[in-house]
Image: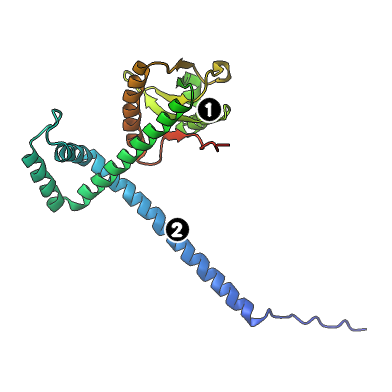
Amino acid sequence: MPQPKLKIMRPPFYLDKVDELGMSFFLNSYIKFVIKVFKIMVDYNFKSYVLSKNFVQIFKDVHYVINFPKSEFCKMSLDLALSISYKMRVEYPNEWKEAERICNAYYKRVKRLKDRISEMLQNGNCLFLTFTFNNLCLQKTNSDTRRQKIRRFLNNYNTDYVANIDFGKKNGREHYHAVIQIDKVDSKLYNYGALSFKKIRSSKDYEKLAKYISKLTNHAIKETTKSNYIIYSRKKSKC
């Protein structure tokens, strides 16, 4: 008995249209993604160029004089500052605009950091922590891995903190500093080097902390050409 022939059914015509639309959507999304990545790379290269050519420092010096012309810390006269600002806007408009953007981001970062630490100090006792890494950890891990180790250690205490990468003056050795809202930490739980801590008690400690905030954000703006290296805890909900 002959076997019945199987009839191959073609999918409905509208499914072909769906496939075409899906492919078109995929291609458009991919093209947008490539353009976005390329733009980020270009922005990073231009930012690095602006930083390397000292446009940012010139912008800071000039605008400090413009904003505080009678300050004893002014490095130039007001007329000279205005002249430099005008010349930069005319001759280097893109670089000057990028320098302004970098400085504005820096000032916002400083304000956010100061506000966060001030809030922590008002809400309770705080510790100033210093994390170092032993030779084995530095050899076997990269900076992102070490950053995650610091974050995980601080997250164990389920409280507010701020931390940032730093480098030694003599040999440039990587370490971290943090301010955490807690009375005590267990240094034995940190297995990647040494952990020291100090209670923030007096106004002198606050003054030292203010100086460190400035230092910390200076490091951050250098390191954050690629990403933000200041580590913040997640905001705790108030009951």
Q: Which residue is drawn at 43% across and 31% down?
A: 119
Q: Quadrant of the N terminus?
A: bottom right
Cα separation between marks 1 and 2: 35 Å
Residue 211 visible to an observer of this rendering: yes
Q: Residue 152, relative to residue 53: is it above or below?
A: above
Place of residue 219 in the rendered image (x, y in percent of width and height, measured from the top left): 34, 31
Q: In which quarter of the image is residue 50?
A: top left
Q: Quadrant of residue 79?
A: top left
Residue that carries the numbered disc 2 in the rendered image: 33
Q: Which residue is drawn at 7% across and 36% down?
A: 77
134 and 161: which one is in front? 161
Judge left or right: residue 160 versus residue 115.
right
In the structure shown, which secondary structural element does the residue marked by tag 2 occupy?
helix
Residue that carries the numbered disc 1 in the rendered image: 154
Sequence order check, earlier mark of 1 and 2: 2
The residue positioned farthest toward the right in the image shown: 1
Report the amino acid beneath label 2: Phe
Residue 48 visible to an observer of this rendering: no
In the structure shown, which secondary structural element does the residue marked by tag 1 occupy?
helix
Place of residue 92 in the rendered image (x, y in percent of width and height, measured from the top left): 16, 50
Report the amino acid beneath label 1: Leu
Q: Badge 1 local density, few (<14 within 10 Å), some, or many (20+)? A: many
Q: Which residue is drawn at 42% across and 33% down?
A: 116
195 and 170: which one is in front? 195
Place of residue 158 in the rendered image (x, y in percent of width and height, measured from the top left): 57, 30
232 and 176: which one is in front? 232
Judge left or right: residue 143 versus residue 69.
right
227 and 117: which one is in front? 117
Q: Residue 170 carries which label?
A: none
Q: Quadrant of the C terminus?
A: top right
Q: Quadrant of residue 54?
A: top left
Place of residue 29 in the rendered image (x, y in percent of width and height, measured from the top left): 48, 63
